[in-house]
Amino acid sequence: MLEHLRLTVPPDLVQGVLDLVTEHECITNVVRHEGVCLVPEGDLIECDVARETTSEVLDDLHRLGLSRQGGVLVMTPDSTPFVEAGRIAALAPGDPEDAVIWPEVVERAEAAGRLTVTYLIFMVLAVVLAAIAVLTDSPILVVGAMVVGPEFGTIAAISVGVVLGKWAIAGRGSTVLVGGFVIAILVVALLALAASWGGLIDAAMLRTARPQTEFIWRPDSWSLVVALVAGTAGVLAMTTDRANAMVGVFISVTTVPAAGNFALALALGDGPEMVGSAQQLGLNLLGMVLAGCFVVLMQRLLWDKVLRLSERVFRYGDRAALSARARDLAP
């Protein structure tokens, strides 16, 4: 698997960038278009790099000053059926599926840590669904609310910001996370008050037996365990770009459901359920943030060593096998 780099290079950085991309053993298909860039002025240099070494190459480009004076665009090709792709993949340590591209991780964290209209809308809708799930004792709606909730990206952003020392990202993420829940809870509480005044709901509905959803406001030791496991899986999925694993994270933790139950309890004046819901929400958020910080820290300290070990154990670095695979793919 390769990443395609499209570099806008000012004249004073051209030679340094060319030396880097032409001498690196895991870079191929280097193309230079002289003087074609207008804003900023300079050359356009393109190349393909093995995914496993992309973060290293981007760091080198940053040290050259390209990220400040020029432009860097990273694209992922859908297919690379040529022999050279297999050769440079064989030279890179580990498997491309395990690669972490840290500049992309930071960029995702920055995006997730911004408060947007759609974030608030999704949060409110998720808490509304959770409140309805509580009233109807519907585990299906609980799952739906968990999937709709947008909070995990913000939790991951906080973890990345704390470990990498990006305090602005961590601060914005914390503000968005707390503010999003507060706004959603207040909106749903107001809706619940209006519904109670209209006779649609009452306090008795909240106090009746709800065997399918009572776990929402009754945290136990397993709540923290699940939060830690889900936070670990979610941040690992984000850093390695495994979006398919995120859905499982969304439906594992009781954050949005607890917020929905808290909003109902607030509107209907049920103190014990307010306390239990707040404990469940806080426990899950804390567990996921701690697990996320641990994952990012371990990846920063040990991931390169893990990839090199995996190369020896799983033979990801078998050059002949990878080159043969590339030849098989080539038309």
Image (cartoon, rainbow, N blue to C red):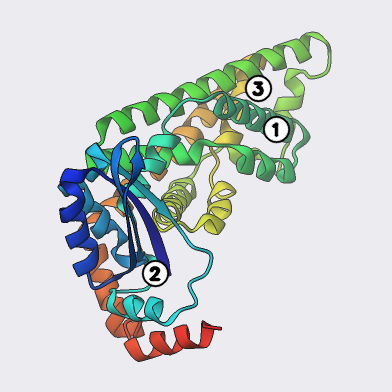
Q: Which mark is residue 2?
A: none
Q: Disc 1 marks which amino acid?
A: Leu
Nearer-N-terminus badge (3/2): 2
Residue 233 is left or right of residue 159, and the answer is right
Q: Disc 2 marks which amino acid?
A: Pro
Residue 18 visible within the image: yes
Nearer-N-terminus badge (3/1): 1
Q: Residue furthest top?
A: 197
The front one of 230 and 34 is 34
Task: Quadrant for residue 24, please give it.
Answer: bottom left
- In percent of width and height, residue 137 lies at 74, 38
Query: What is the spatial separation of the Cα atoms under label 3 and label 2, in whole angstroms?
Result: 47 Å
Query: What is the spatial separation of the Cα atoms under label 2 and label 1, in whole angstroms?
Result: 38 Å
State which quarter of the image contains the N terminus.
bottom left
Q: Residue at x 27, y 38 (%)?
A: 162
Nearer-N-terminus badge (2/1): 2
- In percent of width and height, residue 283 lies at 43, 38
- Residue under pointer 2: 96
Q: Disc 3 marks which amino acid?
A: Leu
Mark 3 vs mark 2: give the one in front.
Answer: 2
Q: Which mark is residue 264?
A: 3
Q: Residue furthest right?
A: 199
Mark 3 vs mark 1: give the one in front.
Answer: 1
Residue 88 is left or right of residue 76, and the answer is left
Query: What is the spatial separation of the Cα atoms under label 3 and label 1, in whole angstroms?
Result: 12 Å
- Residue under pointer 1: 129
Does residue 112 lie above or below 1 as drawn? above
Q: Secondary structure at mark 1?
A: helix
The front one of 189 and 44 is 44
Residue 290 visible within the image: no
